[in-house]
């Protein structure tokens, strides 16, 4: 009896495998949908590759499809999965804008890897403005010590709610390093180079203990480049 039962189970499993193989060989792609895309439009994704709709699932060039999708500006990587009834899902992981580059009359976003990303009029990212780096050519990746300093500064600033909301613009120059403007009154904030964790902390303490008392309008600049002191330039008292 047990042998008969086992034989029946094996038979059913064999039939299921054969049926699954048959369905796979004879099923066609009936629909393509996308997941994970925010800055990359669905139409842009569709136009990146030849439509596989109507093609047998085992005849689709999935590697070529992924390769084509990965050439789009905002796409960092992608993957493809097949579902029931011929549904094909393309899952996209996008690059995230980290700052908005301003270079005279040219603008673009840039991500943490230094990849420049085109602006999309109908979509925007709430990120700081960044000066001191070229927008053109778009194909060039930002790299080197200058960008690494700015990236490290913005990374640390983004960890602090207070710092993130009090800083609106960031620039780089060889002499002063990272220079920012306060969101209120455009006060010049000098952060210099490296050691941004402690400098961000000093800015927070100064903001809470001094600026909240005197007001941001009392200062023209705040220099946080030095290890054990904060140098300020206050506005002259109006008579």
Image (cartoon, rainbow, N blue to C red):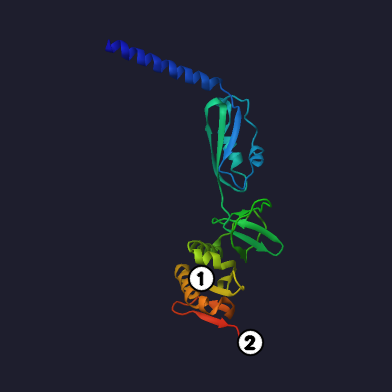
Q: Is residue 46 above or below residue 97?
A: above
Q: Residue at x 60, y 27 (%)?
A: 30
Q: Which residue is mark 2?
A: 238
Identified at 55% across, 41% down, the residue is 78
Residue at image point 31% right, 13% down? 5
Residue 193 bears which disc, if any? 1
Instruction: Please indicate, yes or no, whether residue 158 appears anywhere in the rendered image.
Output: yes
Q: Is residue 27 left or right of residue 159?
A: right
176 relative to 47, above or below: below
Question: In the displayed structure, does residue 197 sit left or right of residue 118?
Answer: left
Q: Position of residue 131 (x, y in %)?
A: 63, 66
Percent from the top left, x then y, of residue 224? 50, 75
Depth check, front residue: 238 or 4 = 238
Dot 1: element: loop
Q: Given the current orientation, which residue lies at the most extreme right position?
A: 105
Q: In 3D space, how far apart are the residues under numbered discs 2 and 1 (Cα atoms)?
A: 34 Å
């Amino acid at each position: 009896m047990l042998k008969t039962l086992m034989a029946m189970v094996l038979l059913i499993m064999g039939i299921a495998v054969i049926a699954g193989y048959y369905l796979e060989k004879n099923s066609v792609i009936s629909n393509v949908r996308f997941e994970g895309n925010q800055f990359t439009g669905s139409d842009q994704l569709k136009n990146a590759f030849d439509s596989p709709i109507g093609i047998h699932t085992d005849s689709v060039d999935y590697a070529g499809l992924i390769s084509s999708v990965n050439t789009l500006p905002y796409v960092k990587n992608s993957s493809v999965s097949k579902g029931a009834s011929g549904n094909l899902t393309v899952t996209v992981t996008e690059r995230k804008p980290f700052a908005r580059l301003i270079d005279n009359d040219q603008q673009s976003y840039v991500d943490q890897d230094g990849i420049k990303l085109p602006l999309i009029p109908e979509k925007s990212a709430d990120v700081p403005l960044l000066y001191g780096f070229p927008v053109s050519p778009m194909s060039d990746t930002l790299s080197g010590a200058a960008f690494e300093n700015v990236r490290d500064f913005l990374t640390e600033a983004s960890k602090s709610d207070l710092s993130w909301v009090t800083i609106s613009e960031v620039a780089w120059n060889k002499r002063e390093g990272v220079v920012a403007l306060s969101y209120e009154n455009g006060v010049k904030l000098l952060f210099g180079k490296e050691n941004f964790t402690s400098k961000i902390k000093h800015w927070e303490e100064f903001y809470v203990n001094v600026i909240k008392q005197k007001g941001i309008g009392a200062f023209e600049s705040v220099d946080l480049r030095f290890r054990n002191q904060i140098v300020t330039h206050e506005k002259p008292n109006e008579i």
